[in-house]
């Protein structure tokens, strides 16, 4: 087992423990606060965040942990660092609040500005996923058994199954896909779970134009999809840079099986949807 996979296994164990806590909160009545308009946060977000940050800091001392619910002052040193963790402790909080099960715990690792490893745990599904770029992607059972996963092989846009955001749907994206002859997109919550659908080959592309969350929404997603043989960039085709200090995904997110990537970038660019 490579050192990178060992690190990924450690991160996955931390994420799985956090997911158990999130599920306990999910099963009980819980209050909802708002960080901004239509940006909910719950006890599940905050306490899973604290648990993951503590676990990663103990296991990997000195590596900054950029986590959604942390005070930015705690991770200011990530810009320019050789490596940094990017954590979304409860990706899909709106779906958590809606109790539709479409949420995930996500931990990604970037080295020298590029996503290299990601773990995504789907608490309600009871499923866990791990990807190391250049080494492979796997679904990992509760007993630790790994089964390889891989993206699909479809290469014609008209045949593609495309997943888009349930909460941030775009009429422009739907129109672009219709122009390519693609069927109506699947709507789903959680950036991470949409990435999982692509990595599993159940969907061929995940398309989000405009604002696409933050780097902690992208890092684990990108690493898992790329490790499974796909591609992930912003909607303009530019790579995500995780070491620059910028945290906002301003130009969308496109995760595909790789074969459809250029065609979708060109279609989005022609429509000015990046």
Image: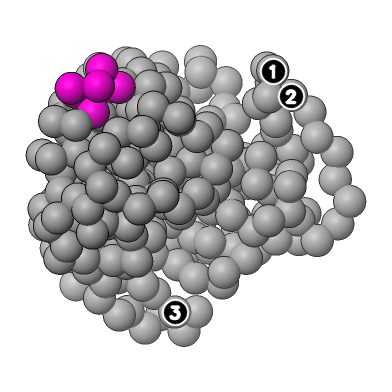
In the rendered view, does 228 fall on the left or right side of 91? left
Q: Is residue 205 above or below residue 12?
A: above
Residue ID at (41%, 49%)? 185
Q: Which residues are magenta?
A: 268-274
Classed neighbour count for the residue bearing mark 2: other residues with Cα under 10 Å, few (<14), some (14–19), many (≥20): few
Q: Do tag 1 and tag 2 residues touch (Cβ < 8 Å)? A: yes
Residue ID at (10%, 39%)? 262
Classed neighbour count for the residue bearing mark 1: other residues with Cα under 10 Å, few (<14), some (14–19), many (≥20): few
Chosen colour scheme: one colour
Q: Which residue is mark 2?
A: 34
Q: Earlier in the sequence, mark 3 or mark 1?
A: 1
Classed neighbour count for the residue bearing mark 3: other residues with Cα under 10 Å, few (<14), some (14–19), many (≥20): few
Q: Is residue 259 above or below residue 17?
A: above
Q: Where the C terminus falls, by quadrant? A: top left
Task: Find residue 155 and report its image quarter.
Answer: bottom left
Measure the alpha-carbon separation of dots 1 and 2: 7 Å
Residue 153 pos. (x, y %): 15, 65
* Secondary structure beneath label 3: loop
In the rendered view, does 32 fall on the left or right side of 6? right
In the drawing, what numbered circle is on residue 37? 1
Q: Nearer the viewer, mark 1 or mark 2?
A: 1
* Secondary structure beneath label 1: loop
Q: Is residue 238 rendered magenta in the image? A: no
Q: Where the N terminus falls, by quadrant? A: bottom left
Residue 112 pos. (x, y %): 16, 31
Of residues 152 and 191, the one nearer the viewer is 152
Q: Which residue is mark 3?
A: 141
Residue ID at (45%, 67%)? 128
Using the rendered image of the protein, determine whether residue 58 is visible from the camera's viewpoint: no
* Secondary structure beneath label 2: strand
């Amino acid at each position: 087992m490579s050192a990178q996979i060992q690190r990924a296994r450690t991160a996955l164990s931390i994420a799985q423990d956090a997911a158990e806590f999130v599920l306990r909160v999910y099963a009980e009545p819980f209050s909802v606060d708002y960080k901004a308009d239509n940006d909910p946060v719950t006890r599940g977000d905050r306490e899973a965040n604290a648990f993951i940050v503590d676990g990663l800091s103990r296991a990997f001392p000195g590596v900054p942990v950029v986590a959604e619910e942390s005070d930015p002052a705690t991770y200011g040193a990530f810009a320019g660092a050789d490596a940094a963790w990017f954590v979304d402790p409860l990706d899909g909080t709106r779906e958590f609040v809606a109790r539709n099960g479409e949420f995930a715990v996500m931990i990604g690792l970037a080295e020298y500005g590029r996503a290299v490893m990601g773990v995504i745990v789907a608490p309600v599904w009871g499923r866990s996923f791990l990807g190391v770029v250049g080494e492979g992607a796997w679904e990992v059972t509760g007993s630790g058994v790994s089964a390889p996963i891989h993206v699909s092989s479809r290469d014609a846009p008209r045949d593609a199954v495309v997943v888009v955001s349930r909460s941030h749907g775009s009429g422009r994206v739907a129109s672009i896909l219709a122009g390519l002859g693609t069927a109506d997109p699947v709507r789903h919550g959680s950036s991470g779970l949409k990435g999982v659908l692509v990595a599993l080959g159940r969907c061929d592309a995940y398309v989000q134009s405009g604002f696409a969350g933050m780097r902690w929404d992208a890092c684990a997603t990108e690493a898992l999809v790329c490790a499974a043989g796909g591609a992930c960039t912003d909607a303009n085709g530019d790579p995500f840079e995780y070491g620059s200090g910028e945290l906002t995904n301003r130009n969308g997110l496109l995760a595909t099986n790789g074969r459809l990537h250029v065609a979708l970038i060109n279609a989005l660019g022609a429509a000015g949807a990046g």
